[in-house]
Image (cartoon, rainbow, N blue to C red):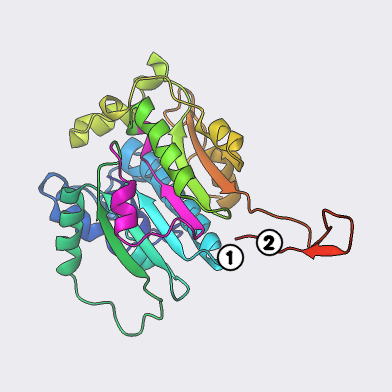
Amino acid sequence: MVAAARAIETHRPDALAVDGYAEHFVRAARASAHWPVHPRQVPGGEAHPLWGRLARYFALRTRVLDDFLLDAVAAGTRQVVLLGAGLDARALRLGWPPGRTVYEIDTADVLAFKHRVLRGLPPRPATDAVSVPVRVPVAADLRTDWAGALTGAGFDPAVPTAWLAEGLLLYLPRAAERALMDTVDRLSAPGSALAYEVKLVREMPEVRDSPVYTVTARETGVDLLALFDGEPRPDSAADLTGRGWSAEVRTPFDFSRLHGRGPRPERHDALAANRWVFAHKARVRTPAREPAADGGGYLVVTDLP
């Protein structure tokens, strides 16, 4: 569904994000082969609850999280981890600085489908001056202990990392979300960054009857509400703050205003409970010169990575 939204967005004249791989993923899966991948295929255009408004939400989220990762690697971060990578093509479509590694964690069947589709595509034209990072698929279930699979694939926990959990945590049980955050914190060197999406509250019945949910179920057979975990959600942003991270919690509508495109608030809005969190693990900083413990002279120290 997110891939279809990205494909539709790619063909918009005011596209927030461009993903030339998305359409191929949609067409390769039997269940979605008939879904729209172009704005002209969407009845009602942006007024359509799924392929209009929700698709624009996914496009806005894609753009904001693209920017988050590109800012991180531009600042020197050399490894990126996509948690629940799904059909994310960021490793292939973004303009990466040289020498970056992108780890894509998902279940083995998802990664196998993705590899099969990508293998069948023609190579990128030589005119594309985009640096392609080392792309490392990691087969693991994020509800279990996945740290060993990641480090076994070459991930270095001593190096600052940019982590991304796009459209993941709202589907995990409460305990699995806490365990995942514990693992991310444990594997994150100072200077690491994390972005993720959550729903803060269980939605009221009026919201659960939103056309976003009803139309999606009718036209695709996907009951989004059945996918969401119904337990009270942990306050992961507060937990990260208690571990020495800074955390900024934003609404999608903040970015609709910033970019001048994207969904706007509605009555009984299915997007109103969504929050995007941007967290950074503080670097260990000490003064360049400190008095020595015995009071004589100075001890020279440096910033730790």
Identify the residue at image location x=31%, y=85%. 126
From where the camera sits, is residue 257 visible?
Answer: yes
Locate the N terminus and report the quarter of the image it occupies: top left
Secondary structure of the residue carrying numbered label 2: loop
* In the image, residue 169 lies in the stretch drawn in magenta: yes
Q: Amino acid at mark 1?
A: Ala
- Residue at point 70%, 55% (across, down): 285
Few, some or many residues within 10 Å of mark 1 (<14, 14–19, 20+): few
Q: In the current view of this chain or complex, which residue is farthest to the bottom?
A: 126
The answer to whether residue 3 is seen in the rendering is no
Q: Quadrant of the C terminus?
A: bottom right
Chain-order first, disc 2 or disc 1: 1
Q: Residues within 10 Å of mark 2 (few under 14, many from 20)?
A: few
Residue picked out by circle 1 = 75
**Which residue is at a point 51% across and 65% down the rendered structure image?**
73
Q: Please state if 111 lies on the left or on the right of 199 as rendered.
A: left
Instruction: Left or right? Give the position of 50 relative to 165.
Output: left
- In the rendered image, residue 148 lying in the magenta stretch gets the answer yes
Residue 100 coordinates in the image, percent (x, y): 43, 69
Single out the mark in the foreground, 2 or 1: 2
Q: Is residue 182 above or below residue 7?
A: above
Q: Residue at x 37, y 41 (%)?
A: 167
Q: Amino acid at mark 2?
A: Asp
Residue extending furthest toward the front: 294
Front-lying residue, 291 or 188: 291
In the image, which residues are magenta? 144-170
**Residue 184, image quadrant:** top left
Residue 303's disc number = 2
Whole-percent x and y of residue 59? 41, 50
Against 258, residue 236 (above or below) is above
